[in-house]
C-alpha cells in the first residue's frame, strides 16, 4: 500500500491544475481540442433533458416501455444515448407498490450519457452514507414521503451497471405530447429523490 | 480496503446539502481535472478501476474534507506518477524535467466524442460458468482485503437473494492492481433492509447491489 500519510498538506487545487496543464502541454501529452470537446460535451450537450426524453417516450409508447424495461442498454443505444458511464443502463420502474432510489456508496457512479454529470449532493458523504440505511428519512428531507405500504428499493450502483428510475406518469397528463411530458420530468425524479408532479395550471 | 470511501450505512454525516442551479463545473480547474482524467483513460494510461483505487488511498481526513474534483485530482496525479508519465517534481513545478517519461499519443477530439456518444461495453464476450442463478440464497463473504474492492462493508456476512445475472465483467479487485484478470459473473443481489440494519428498518424495504462471483458464498 502506498504510504502518503506523512507528506505535506495538499496545496490549492487551482495551482496544482495550472502546473499539470503546463507540464502536460509542454510534453505534448494532451490535445487541447479534445480537452475542450470533453468539457463542452458535459457542460452543454448531455444532461437530464436526455433522460427525460427516454421517460416521456416510455410513457407514450407501450412497446418502447417494454423494450426499455427488458433491455435498457439496447433501448438507450437505439436512441443514440449510450456512451461512457452510460452503456449498461438499467431502468427501474416506479409503481404504486415500489419506489426506487439510486446511489453509489463507494464513489459516484451515475448514468452520465442520459443524465449528465451528477449534482454535488449525489456525490456527497451524507447521501452516500444514508441512502442505503435510511432512505425514507432522506427522501423526507427531499420533500418526498413514501407511504408505509410502498417498498423502497435502493440501488447501490457499485459495479459497471448504471441505473435510471422510470417515474410514474402524473395523473391528468395522458393527453400531453411527448415533449410536453419530457418538460415535467426532473433529474431528481430519475434518481428517485422526487416524483413527477403534474403541470401547474 | 476498508477505507473512508466505503460510506454505505455510516452515520452522523448530517443532512444532504443541495445547491440550486448548480453548474456542471464550479471553476475551470474542475472541468480540466475531469477532462484530463477522461483523456488519460482514453489514451490508455490507466483503467477506471485503477483510478478508483488511487482515489481511495487518499488519507481519510483529506478525503472527507476535499471537494469532489480534488479527489479526482489526487487520483490523477497519483496515476501519472505511478505510470511514470510525470515525476513528482514535474507535477510540483509544472515543468518538463526529463524526456524519457512514459508517453502515449493523446486522445483526439474525434475519439473523445466517439467514446462519449457510443456504447462502451465493460461486459466481456467470454464464456465463464456462473456459480449462481436467479433465486439462489447467498451470503456476501466476510473479507477485509487490503486492496481495492467493490464489496462494501455494510453487506459483508449478510444473506441475500440473487435476482439477475448481468453477465461477465473484470473483477475490480485484481483489475485495479494490474493483477491477473479474473473475468466473472456479476449479479444483482437483493438484501432485505432488516437483514442489513436490524429490526428498526421497514420490513418491506430492500437494497439491491451488484456483486461479483468472488464476493459470494452459497447461504
Image (cartoon, coloured by chain):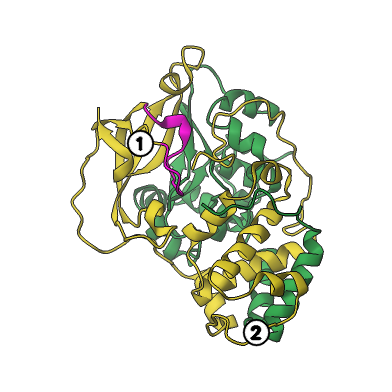
Chain colours: A green, B yellow
**Residue under the image location 62 percent in, 82 percent down:** A29
Our reading of the magenta stretch's main secondary structure is loop
Name which quarter of the figure residue B3 lies in. Answer: top right
Looking at the image, can residue A168 be seen? no
**Residue under the image location 37 percent in, 26 percent down:** B158
Name which quarter of the figure residue B211 lies in. Answer: top left
Q: Secondary structure at mark 2?
A: loop
Image position of B98 (left or right of B142): right
Q: Residue furthest front?
A: A6
Check the residue under mark 2 and report the chain it is in.
B
**Mark nearer the N terminus (2 vs 1):** 2
Which span of residues is magenta-colored?
B144-157
Image position of A166 (left or right of B128): right
Residue at mark 2: B98
Q: Is residue A187 above or below residue B178?
A: above
* Residue B150: image tag: none
Residue at mark 1: B189
- Measured as percent of width and height from the top left, residue B198 is found at 46, 15
Looking at the image, can residue B183 be seen? yes
- Measured as percent of width and height from the top left, residue A178 is found at 56, 54
Amino acid at each position: 500500500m502506498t504510504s502518503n500519510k506523512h507528506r505535506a498538506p495538499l496545496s490549492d487545487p487551482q495551482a496544482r491544475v495550472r502546473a499539470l496543464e503546463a507540464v502536460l502541454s509542454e510534453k505534448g501529452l494532451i490535445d487541447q481540442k479534445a480537452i475542450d470537446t470533453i468539457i463542452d460535451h458535459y457542460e452543454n450537450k448531455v444532461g437530464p433533458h436526455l433522460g427525460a426524453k427516454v421517460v416521456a417516450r416510455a410513457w407514450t409508447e407501450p412497446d418502447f416501455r417494454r423494450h426499455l424495461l427488458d433491455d435498457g442498454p439496447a433501448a438507450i443505444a437505439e436512441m443514440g444515448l449510450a456512451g461512457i458511464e452510460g452503456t449498461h443502463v438499467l431502468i427501474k420502474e416506479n409503481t404504486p407498490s415500489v419506489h426506487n432510489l439510486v446511489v453509489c456508496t463507494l464513489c459516484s457512479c451515475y448514468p452520465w450519457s442520459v443524465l449528465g454529470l451528477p449534482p454535488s449532493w449525489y456525490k456527497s458523504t451524507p447521501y452516500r452514507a444514508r441512502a442505503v440505511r435510511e432512505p425514507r428519512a432522506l427522501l423526507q428531507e427531499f420533500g418526498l414521503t413514501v407511504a408505509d405500504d410502498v417498498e423502497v428499493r435502493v440501488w447501490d450502483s457499485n459495479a459497471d451497471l448504471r441505473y435510471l428510475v422510470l417515474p410514474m406518469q402524473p395523473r391528468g397528463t395522458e393527453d400531453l405530447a411527448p415533449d410536453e411530458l419530457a418538460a415535467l420530468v426532473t433529474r431528481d425524479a430519475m434518481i428517485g429523490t422526487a416524483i413527477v408532479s403534474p403541470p401547474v395550471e | 480496503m476498508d477505507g473512508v470511501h466505503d460510506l454505505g450505512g455510516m452515520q452522523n454525516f448530517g443532512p444532504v446539502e443541495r445547491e440550486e442551479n448548480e453548474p456542471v463545473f464550479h471553476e475551470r480547474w474542475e472541468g480540466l481535472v475531469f477532462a484530463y482524467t477522461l483523456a488519460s483513460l482514453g489514451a490508455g494510461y490507466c483503467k477506471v478501476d485503477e483510478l478508483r483505487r488511487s482515489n481511495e488511498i487518499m488519507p481519510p481526513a483529506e478525503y472527507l474534507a476535499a471537494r469532489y474534483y480534488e479527489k479526482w485530482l489526487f487520483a490523477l496525479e497519483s496515476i501519472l506518477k505511478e505510470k511514470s508519465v510525470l515525476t513528482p517534481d514535474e507535477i510540483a513545478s509544472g515543468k518538463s524535467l526529463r524526456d524519457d517519461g512514459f508517453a502515449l499519443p493523446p486522445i483526439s477530439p474525434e475519439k473523445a466524442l466517439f467514446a462519449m456518444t457510443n456504447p462502451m461495453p465493460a461486459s466481456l464476450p467470454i464464456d465463464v460458468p456462473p456459480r449462481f442463478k436467479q433465486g439462489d440464497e447467498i451470503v456476501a463473504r466476510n473479507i477485509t482485503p487490503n486492496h481495492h474492492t467493490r464489496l462494501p462493508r455494510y453487506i459483508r456476512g449478510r444473506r441475500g437473494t440473487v435476482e439477475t445475472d448481468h453477465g461477465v465483467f473484470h473483477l475490480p479487485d485484481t483489475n485495479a492492481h494490474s493483477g491477473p484478470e479474473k473475468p466473472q459473473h456479476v449479479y444483482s443481489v437483493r438484501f432485505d433492509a432488516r437483514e442489513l440494519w436490524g429490526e428498526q428498518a421497514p420490513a418491506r424495504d430492500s437494497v439491491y447491489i451488484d456483486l461479483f462471483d468472488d464476493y459470494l458464498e452459497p447461504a
